[in-house]
Image (cartoon, grey):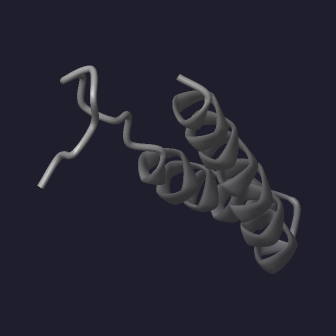
């Protein structure tokens, strides 16, 4: 399944999407805007996951 040349496994960026979405919901809930918090958390999580993917791709 892992066709990488170096034999080093890929890093999992999906954890950042999931965790930041949950954190965003709770943080937004305290401010009365859980949907906005969810969207901001998702955006940040996706940005971090894409950054990890881009870093792995350049190797």
Q: Position of residue 11 (x, y in %)?
A: 38, 34
Q: Is residue 19 left or right of residue 42?
A: left
Q: Residue at x 67, y 65 (%)?
A: 25
In the rendered image, which quarter is residue 52 located in? top right
Q: Position of residue 39 (x, y in %)?
A: 79, 70
In the rendered image, which quarter is residue 34 located in? bottom right
Q: Position of residue 33 (x, y in %)?
A: 86, 73
Q: Position of residue 42 (x, y in %)?
A: 70, 63
| Nearer to the camera, 52 or 38 | 52
| Nearer to the camera, 7 or 35 | 7
55 is higher (above) or lower (below) than 33: above
48 is higher (above) or lower (below) than 56: below
Q: Is residue 47 left or right of residue 5?
A: right
11 is higher (above) or lower (below) than 32: above
Count how many numbered circles sit on residues in the image.
0
Q: Residue at x 21, y 45 (%)?
A: 3
Q: Can you name the residue that lies furthest to the left here?
A: 1
Q: Is the N terminus in the top left, top right, bottom left or bottom right quadrant?
A: bottom left
In the rendered image, which quarter is residue 10 located in? top left
| Nearer to the camera, 4 or 45 | 4
Q: Can you name the residue that lies furthest to the front here?
A: 5
Q: Is residue 56 left or right of residue 24?
A: left
Q: Residue at x 50, y 50 (%)?
A: 19
56 is higher (above) or lower (below) than 3: above
Q: Is residue 16 left or right of residue 55?
A: left
């Amino acid at each position: 399944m892992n066709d990488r040349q170096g034999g080093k496994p890929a890093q999992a960026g999906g954890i950042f999407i999931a965790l930041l979405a949950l954190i965003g919901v709770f943080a937004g809930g305290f401010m009365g805007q859980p949907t906005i918090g969810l969207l901001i958390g998702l955006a940040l999580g996706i940005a971090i996951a894409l950054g990890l993917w881009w870093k792995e791709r350049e190797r």
